[in-house]
Image (tube, rainbow, N blue to C red):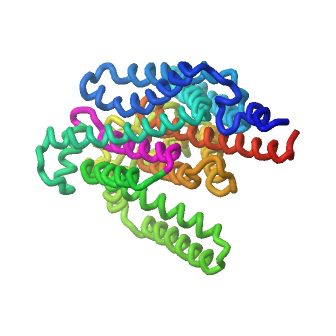
Amino acid sequence: MSESQVIAATGWPGIQLQYQPKFSVLFWSGLAAAGIPIIISLYWIIFWLAPESEGAFLRVAIVGCSLPLAFIWYRAPLSYAEINLIRVLSIAALLLLAPVLMATQPSRAFSGWIKMLVLFSICCFVARGLRHPPTAHVFGIALLVGGVILTAFILYTYVRSLGFTIPTYKVAREFKGIEEMAGIPLNSVAFTAVLSYVAGLCLIRINWLLILIGIPLFLTSSIFTGSRAPLVILGVSVFALLCINGFRSKSLLVWVLTAVLALTTVLSGLTIVVIASDKDLTAATEGRWHLWSVGLHKFTERPLFGYGYESWRDDLVSRLPGEYDLTFALAKSLGGGYHNEYVSVFAEEGLVGLLASGLIVWLLLRSSWLLAFRDWGAVHTKQWPLFACLFMLLRANFEVPGLFGYGQDPVDYLAYVLVAIVLSRFSVEEDAANFIALKGGAVR
């Protein structure tokens, strides 16, 4: 078999070698892919300008951009990674149908299930298109641009509301309150910017220019929103990645030091939780502690199937302690819910939902882990997808939008975009491995 035949058979270094559409079609593939991150970044700006139109804009526009990707690349053979993605998402969708049927309000739960199916479909369509290197490159650039757009939007709204006042913590909290009164949750806007940037680096080789873009992006998302979460989650994600590398070190000394550091950190965190008072924990988590407690208590009442999609709207506020105004304000905010994706899964889908969610998390972490530590060479951003996954999954402890959100926030879409990116990178590595094996004569 000649090298050209091998490339045509394996599709490496890109899916376009398996199925060779015209240049104009490739142009539309890149354009459709670039549209998805830009639409996500423009969501809150459109909401700010026309509050009644943003929901339809987000869902219809992203589906409209992802369908061309599916149509352009449908003739290309499925990779094993794509088959695995479809299998896991299909099983998760079937499992989550049970909590829908057992929900206290099945019609509302069914609506949430349909939104989830839309997210799953978009994820599969995008994963197909991102196996095409030029499309993936354009997509990565668009993600970085989207993060910059949202950072500029945060700065613009700050100057518009408070002028050029120095953003102290007190001033930033005041700014956050002003924007939330206008219906714009700065936490979600800031995290969309950060996750868009982090996801973009999974597709673009990192350099000093991108680092210089990222520093003000992270600082803006924290300083100008009055939230410590972005920098804390960033620090914990870096710490977790360093620990993972430490445990994989061949040096016994490094392994022992990593184990001592990790164990000390975990025990210190548990000790603080046990010793600290209920009031202190509520203040430290900005009211979330009681929301989590209510969600876990509701899980114990209906542990198998939970109460159903968005069931927090029925009784969350009535179950909260009356003396904590901060908790009430948080519960009534736009994001709503228990401000924790995992607690939401427990309370709303029970153990069945936990199994479905666990399958998705396992697929994501396993794929990003293999990308990071297998000795392959097709993807240059080796450990960045793993870092991005850790960052997103750790953030899920503090807010609902994400992998297990309600299918209507930009972060919900961006989370499944990240899943698509990771699986597409795994597909590219798979194609490269097949190519190398065939070229060496290992496979006939």
When asked about the image quadrant of residue 170, the answer is bottom left
Asked whether residue 103 appears in the rendered view, the answer is: no
Q: Is residue 225 above or below residue 283?
A: above
Q: Nearer the viewer, residue 336 or 313?
A: 336
Tell me if 339 is positioned left or right of 246 in this view: left
* Residue 186 included in the magenta stretch of the image: yes
Single out the residue that lies furthest toward the right. 444
Tell me if 348 is positioned left or right of 322 in this view: right
Q: Nearer the viewer, residue 396 or 427?
A: 427
The image quadrant where one finds the C terminus is: top right
Query: Over which residues does the magenta segment extend?
Result: 181-205
Tell me if 311 is positioned left or right of 420 in this view: left
Q: Nearer the viewer, residue 433 or 172?
A: 433
Magenta part mainly helix, strand or loop? helix
Residue 217: where, in percent of width, then height? Answer: 33, 49
Q: Is residue 429 above or below residue 244?
A: above
Residue 205: where, in percent of width, then height? Answer: 50, 49
Tell me if 119 is positioned left or right of 320 in this view: right
Could you tell me which residue is drawn at 66 percent across and 32 percent down? Answer: 15
Residue 344: where, in percent of width, then height? Answer: 49, 41
